[in-house]
Image (cartoon, grey):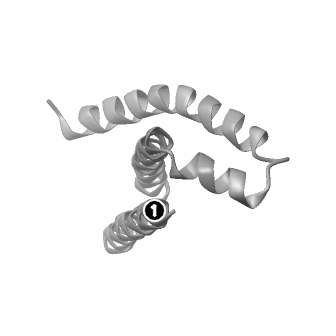
Amino acid sequence: MIKATKKWLIIKISSGLLIPFMAWFIINIVSLLDANSSQTLVTFSNLSTKITMFLFIVIAFVFYTLTISEVFEDYISNLKIKNAANRLLVLFSILFTVLLIIFLIKI
């Protein structure tokens, strides 16, 4: 399969997977608006919530990284700048995902 086709398929699959995760996330965040800090900690210390949040974060960062790299491909013509931007984007995405997951585990 062509690299661009794989990238397109991953973007489409991850965007489809993000829809139920976004609904779950919005429902949980709205339910926590009136909660105190102990209720919030109980919610996020639940193992199923942690696993769901982990999957949501990973899928979201895969989707956003690939989507932004497509923007770089379309609008940056200089190959060196495009490669540097893509590498920085992937580095930032990996770093930010790992940090969020570490904070999620610590709760």
Residue 21 pos. (x, y %): 54, 33
Q: Residue furthest left?
A: 1
Disc 1 crowd rating (10 Å Cα; few below 14, some 14-19, many 20+) is some
Direction from residue 78 to residue 2 in the image, left or right: left
Q: Residue furthest right?
A: 34
Q: Nearer the viewer, residue 92 or 97?
A: 97
Direction from residue 3 to residue 24 in the image, left or right: right
Vertical order, 38 against 91 (above or below): above
Residue type indicated by callout 1: Ile
Residue at position x 56%, y 51% in the image: 44
Residue identifier under label 1: 76
Direction from residue 105 to residue 4 in the image, left or right: left
Residue 28 pos. (x, y %): 67, 38
Residue at position x 26%, y 31% in the image: 5
Vertical order, 66 against 52 (above or below): below
Residue 105 pos. (x, y %): 42, 61
Residue 17 pos. (x, y %): 45, 28
Q: How many marks?
A: 1
Direction from residue 96 to residue 19 in the image, left or right: right
Vertical order, 64 against 85 (above or below): above
Q: Which quarter of the rendered picture does the N terminus lie within?
A: top left
Q: Locate residue 12: give its quadrant.
A: top left
Q: Nearer the viewer, residue 86 or 32?
A: 32
**SS under mark 1:** loop
Q: Nearer the viewer, residue 60 or 89?
A: 60
Q: Locate residue 13: give its quadrant.
A: top left
